[in-house]
Image (cartoon, grey):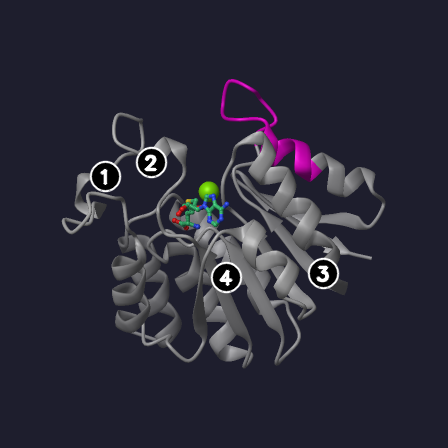
Amino acid sequence: MTRVDELLALGAEVKGFMPPSEGRALYEAGLDQRRGGTWLEIGAWCAKSAIYLGAAAEQLDCVVFSLDHHHGSEENQRGWDYFDEELVDAHDGRLNTLPHWQRNIARARLEDVVVGLVGASQVVAPHFATPLDLLFIDGGHGEEVAWADYRAWAPRIVPGGSLLIHDVFEDPAAGGRPPYEIYLAALDSGDFTERAHRGSLRWLRRR
Ligand code: SAH
Ligand code: MG
């Protein structure tokens, strides 16, 4: 098994919210980047998407910052649709994906490629100044959080860099609006053009 096959298989196996076809598309978007760049994903969960991105970043000597407060979004809390009892920390009863994220990145042998940023996106954003070659938005999907992520982070993408947005559904019956709205806003801004899409993953390029 090649290294890439190993990582794509591991990405498919770990807990998370992305079918393998979209994971592969994320990997392919990563492969299209320049060498040595800085990437950021918002919404790490248990490192599924970080492994797909990491598989490409490793080949290009890029670093992926994988940002999350690791306490889950609203829909991940007890009583909601995407709650997972296995992710509850027995110590304090809170959802905590960080140990799972760490174990999965270690298992993938991506510790020198994927670096965790533990905190809320809106807290980190004003203090993170590195221009981004690739930004993957897959954090909170509520109106306020999704727009805050787009407004704070999309301007940091360098010309020619990539903006990837997950859970973009044109049909309101298929999923929540905010990721679709920020996708439209990015196109309307005139700063981005569409590169490709697979499933609910949209790939835009900064002019
Ligand atoms: N990319 C992951 C899925 C991410 S789920 C995968 O491939 O499986 C969305 C994540 O966003 C959750 O882990 C949640 O904790 C995180 N999140 C939600 N709001 C956030 C915020 N304001 N700051 C940081 N992380 C946030
Ligand atoms: Mg998602």
Instruction: For the C terminus, give its image quadrant.
Output: bottom right
Question: Answer yes or no: do the residues labelled 3 and 2 have beta carbons within 8 Å?
Answer: no
Label 3: which residue?
156
Q: Secondary structure at mark 1?
A: loop
Query: Mark 1 or mark 4: which comes first in sequence?
Result: 4
Seen from the viewer's position, the closer of residues 32 and 175 is: 175
Q: Nearer the viewer, mark 3 or mark 4?
A: 3
x, y percentage for residue 93?
A: 19, 43
Q: Nearer the viewer, mark 2 or mark 4?
A: 2
- Which residue occupies 57% across, 68% down? 31
x, y percentage for residue 141?
A: 51, 35
Q: Amino acid at mark 1?
A: Asp
Q: How many C-alpha atoms fall within 10 Å of the one at disc 1: few (<14), some, or many (≥20)?
A: some
Query: Mark 3 or mark 1: which comes first in sequence?
Result: 1
Q: Secondary structure at mark 4?
A: helix
Q: Amino acid at mark 4?
A: Tyr
Q: Is 136 situated left or right of 20 in this image?
A: right
Label 1: which residue?
84
Seen from the viewer's position, the closer of residues 16 and 73 is: 73
Gap between marks 2 and 4, in whole Å? 25 Å
Seen from the viewer's position, the closer of residues 161 and 85 is: 85
Label 2: which residue?
76
Magenta residue span: 169-183
